[in-house]
Image (tube, rainbow, N blue to C red):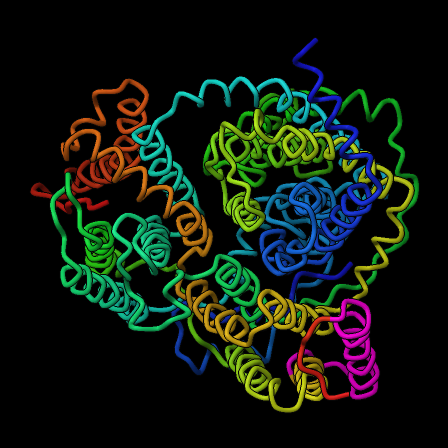
């Protein structure tokens, strides 16, 4: 049976270097050891395999973003006019929510310092970033040259470089996928998705 | 017998070929995404929302519902065979299911799970059939104050029961409410937070938000979550459990049905909590609890029954009160709104075809799923060979092209990508996306009913306490909001009282 590995388990809160090296050397327990784990041990192991937790800085940063959004919305709501509860102006409701948001942001900033629920950005985070850039490029190019070529490039990037497929299966499957999308969205459904051919 | 007439008419709706076809499509997709680890039912439903634009409301909801409860069946397969839970609600199935597979009883485990799922699902539909009209007729008297309290309680419960930090989940909910207020103010007609942008004046559409935050956000997040190599498992034989196994598991199935049904109705409850509660209950009740974790059939049958029962019964609050009980139901709510149907107590009366069509389609869906998971289970086991690396770009492309088809505009596609970034970052920083989407769909209802109530009460918030139902709901709201903080503070005080006097007081803000 396949062990539940392949997840880099860097020690939580370790330096970025140890996190990075953890990505290259997944800890793999022998199969028979894994097979004899009790539910509690199994749960503990899943916990261990989770990506490393981010430190207090990440909490501070996210809390500040929340505070920023809250205060911004508060200012804009006041500008819209608050009115009274019996005769409210448009700003009253957003004002109430933004007050709650500011309170929660402050609470999180102070009380959430030691929370470990945020994840650290590791070398693995390059994958979503690459994915995002390719998606953004596709959105930019679609109106100009249609969806087929950008979609093909996107498939190749995601399969070969993010997914580690072989070149052979990447090229074969990407072509089939794009052809299938062409068949469904252009030929069968007749949608107006921008297309080149 | 008058009561049964619309129920029977509902069957006529289900048996229309289109609806049957969409039911089949829904449960097959649900089963597939249940088998494939990664994308959950909420993300899948979000990605497929554009598909529902061109079909009848009842057809659309039949398909989306099929995805939801189908995923509960499919999630079992990977739990048992690979010890990789396909869905969050199948995590506890791993403990005993995988041990059974190791003992060469994988078929028995899967068979028990699907029979349990079928019984649990069907029992919950019957419960739904009788309970939903009662709740709906009770709720017909609800006015704006009751809806204000109910919506607030629903959002709070979903936020506090979520897995991560409660404060962060509440932040997500507040953000959802803020996003919902973008656009024209319904009472005065003035623009809010539009920054002069014309497309924003009508407010932000629900579909791009859901597709971005749930769909694309999850796809991006999974890119990082390494591709777990799933070796194709050994052949599964003998999925028909023996009479002895069935007898041993029947108690667990019965208890799981009831427990799951009730946990599913509660806001914030749902399949995941139901499966965990059922596992805990079976272990506690067992004469030899040490068998659990070593391949006890009850440990598979109970949770799998409960998660299906809960998945079905969580439709009750949505279809009778118009309050979604969890994030997936929030997506259904959004899908119904797109179709011009507002879920609420009047739905049973005014739209019986829709209501009973959806409810009765679940019988058909469960039968289809039973067929797929007993005789046809081998096909779905083969699907495990499809690698995540291939699936990810396909789902991403479906999302982008699907978003384009909503309004044939690139604006929506861009919006989806932007909300995809938001969703990814939220997950990364520990903010649950569920409460955001739920609060977003309830935002307008909450604001308008709160403002209407305040108009009625002449601006006095104390008016909420003048009506018995809204007063009760508000009291529950305050209790849910304050209790965890008080309890944490008491625990801290007790701990620090032992070590040193004068504990630091932290004021709980909710």
Q: In the figure, residue B370 lies in which quadrant? A: top right
Residue at image location 30% in from the left, 73% down from the top: B196
Task: For the C terminus of chain B, give its image quadrant.
Answer: top left
Quarter assignment of residue B472: top left
Going by the image, does A101 lie left or right of B291?
left
Give the main secondary structure of the magenta stretch. Answer: helix
Relative depth, front residue between B136 and A59: B136
Q: In this view, does B147 lie to the left or right of B278?
A: left
Residue B113 in percent (x, y) is at 76, 36
Q: Is A129 contained in the magenta span?
A: no
Residue B345: where, in percent of width, then height? 49, 27
Residue B164, above or below A164: above
Query: Is residue A150 positioned above or below B449 on the image?
Result: below
The outermost residue toward the front is B189
Kindly tell me whether residue B286 is visible in this rendering.
Answer: no
Task: Name the residue at 17% across, 38% down.
Answer: B493
Give the residue at x 79% y 70%: A184
The stretch of residues the image draws in magenta is A162-190
View extreme (bottom): residue: A145
Q: Can residue B47 be seen in this view?
A: yes
Q: Position of residue B378 (x, y in %)?
A: 89, 50
């Amino acid at each position: 049976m396949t062990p539940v590995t392949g997840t880099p388990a860097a020690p939580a809160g370790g330096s970025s270097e140890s996190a990075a090296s953890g990505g290259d050397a997944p800890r793999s327990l022998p199969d028979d050891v894994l097979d004899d784990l009790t539910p509690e041990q199994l749960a503990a192991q899943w916990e261990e395999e989770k990506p490393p937790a981010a430190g207090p800085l990440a909490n501070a940063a996210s809390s500040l973003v929340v505070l920023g959004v809250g205060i911004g919305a508060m200012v804009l709501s006041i500008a819209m006019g608050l009115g009274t509860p019996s005769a409210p102006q448009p700003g009253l409701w957003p004002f109430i929510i933004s007050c709650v948001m500011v309170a929660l942001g402050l609470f999180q900033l102070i009380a959430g310092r030691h929370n470990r629920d945020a994840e650290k950005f590791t070398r693995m985070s390059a994958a979503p970033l690459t994915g995002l850039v390719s998606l953004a490029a596709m959105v930019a190019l679609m109106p100009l040259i249609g969806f087929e070529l950008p979609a093909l490039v996107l498939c190749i990037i995601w399969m070969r470089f993010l997914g580690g497929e072989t070149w052979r299966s990447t090229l074969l499957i990407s072509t089939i996928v794009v052809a299938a999308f062409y068949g469904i969205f252009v030929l069968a459904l007749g949608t107006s998705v921008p297309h080149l051919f | 017998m008058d009561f049964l007439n619309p129920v029977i008419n509902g069957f006529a709706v289900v048996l229309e070929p289109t609806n049957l076809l969409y039911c089949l499509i829904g449960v097959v997709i649900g089963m597939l995404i249940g088998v494939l680890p990664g994308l959950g039912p909420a993300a899948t439903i979000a990605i497929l929302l554009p598909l529902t634009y061109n079909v009848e409301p009842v057809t659309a909801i039949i398909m989306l519902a099929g995805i939801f409860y189908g995923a509960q069946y499919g999630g079992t397969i990977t739990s048992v065979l690979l010890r990789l839970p396909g869905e969050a609600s199948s995590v506890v199935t791993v403990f005993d299911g995988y041990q059974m597979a190791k003992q060469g009883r994988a078929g028995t485990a899967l068979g028990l799970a699907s029979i349990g799922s079928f019984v649990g699902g069907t029992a919950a539909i019957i419960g739904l059939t009788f309970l939903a009209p009662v709740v709906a007729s009770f709720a017909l008297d609800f006015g704006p104050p009751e809806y204000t309290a109910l919506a607030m309680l629903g959002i709070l419960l979903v936020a506090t029961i979520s897995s991560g930090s409660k404060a962060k989940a509440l932040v997500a909910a507040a953000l959802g409410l803020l996003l919902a207020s973008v656009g024209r103010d319904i009472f005065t007609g003035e623009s809010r937070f539009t920054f002069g942008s014309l497309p924003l004046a009508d407010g932000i559409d629900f579909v791009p938000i859901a597709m971005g935050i749930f769909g694309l956000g999850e796809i991006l997040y999974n890119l990082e979550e390494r591709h777990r190599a799933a070796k194709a498992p050994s052949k599964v034989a003998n999925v028909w459990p023996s009479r002895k196994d069935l007898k041993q598991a029947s108690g667990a199935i019965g208890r799981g049905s009831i427990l799951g049904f009730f946990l599913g109705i509660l806001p914030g409850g749902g399949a995941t909590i139901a499966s965990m509660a059922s596992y805990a209950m079976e272990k506690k009740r067992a004469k030899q609890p040490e068998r659990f974790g070593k391949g006890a059939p009850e440990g598979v049958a109970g949770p799998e029954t409960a998660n299906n029962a809960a998945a079905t019964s969580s439709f009750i609050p949505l279809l009778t009160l118009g309050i979604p009980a969890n994030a997936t139901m929030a997506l259904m709510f959004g899908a119904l709104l797109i179709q011009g149907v507002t879920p609420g107590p009047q739905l049973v009366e005014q739209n019986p075809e829709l209501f009973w069509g959806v409810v009765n389609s679940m019988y058909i869906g469960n039968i289809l799923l039973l067929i797929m998971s007993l005789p046809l289970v081998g096909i779905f086991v083969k699907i495990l060979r499809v690698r995540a690396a291939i699936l990810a770009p396909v789902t991403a492309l479906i999302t982008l092209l699907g978003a384009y088809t909503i309004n044939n505009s690139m604006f929506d596609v861009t919006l989806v990508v932007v909300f995809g970034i938001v969703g990814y970052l939220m997950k990364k920083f520990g903010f649950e996306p569920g409460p955001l989407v739920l609060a977003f769909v309830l935002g307008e209802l909450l604001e308008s009913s709160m403002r209407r109530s305040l108009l009625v009460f002449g601006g006095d918030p104390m008016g909420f306490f003048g009506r018995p139902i809204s007063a009760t709901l508000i009291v529950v709201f305050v209790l849910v909001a304050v209790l965890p903080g008080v309890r944490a503070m008491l625990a801290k005080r007790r701990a620090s009282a032992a070590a040193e006097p004068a504990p630091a007081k932290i004021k709980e803000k909710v």
